[in-house]
Amino acid sequence: MTDGPQSFRTRTLVEAWRGSLLARGLSVSSVNQRLSAVRLLFRKAADRGALTAEEALRLASVPNVKQGGQRLGKWLTEGEAGKLLGVIFEPRCRAVLKTEILSFSILALRLNRRQLRGCCT
């Protein structure tokens, strides 16, 4: 490829492809994920000499689609979060919390017996 109209058309082609994905009704996150894969393809092509680094950068510069919307649900205020943490760390809840953390550690980290003994003492 050269630094001329052909490179411009190729970037324009990527932008048109992004638009066609949106027109097909794909979600914004799906379109952005596919753009990310194409950017990786351009980087790999530059690494292997199929594109120059400048061409790969120009082609990969097609921006993501902006995600809009709002979070749904009830979110805690700062005061409510502080109150919840205060309850969790009360002395009567600490034993339950320690047990839950220990259970998680055993399952997620698959601690061996020696590590488990060291953590409980």
Image: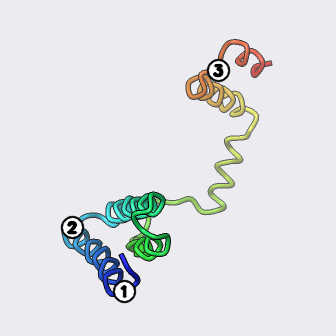
Instruction: Tell me where residue 61 sits by quadrant.
Output: bottom left
Please state if 54 lies on the left or on the right of 20 as rendered: right
Q: Which mark is residue 43?
A: none
- How is the structure coloured here? rainbow
Nearer the camera: disc 2 or disc 1: 1
- Amino acid marked by disc 1: Gly
Residue 91 percent coordinates (x, y): 76, 34
Q: What's the CA distance linking mark 1 and mark 3?
A: 60 Å
Sequence-earlier tag: 3 or 2 = 2
Q: Within 10 angstroms of label 3, few (less than 14), some, or many (20 or more) residues?
A: some
**Which residue position holds label 3?**
111
Q: Which mark is residue 4?
A: 1
Residue 89 percent coordinates (x, y): 72, 40
Sequence-earlier tag: 1 or 3 = 1
Residue drawn at x 48%, y 59% is 47
Q: Which mark is residue 25?
A: 2
Q: What's the CA distance linking mark 2 and mark 1?
A: 33 Å
Q: Within 10 angstroms of label 1, few (less than 14), some, or many (20 or more) residues?
A: few
Residue 12 in view in this figure: yes
- Amino acid marked by disc 3: Leu
Q: What's the CA distance linking mark 3 and mark 2?
A: 46 Å
Residue 75 percent coordinates (x, y): 52, 60
Please state if 81 lies on the left or on the right of 51 as rendered: right
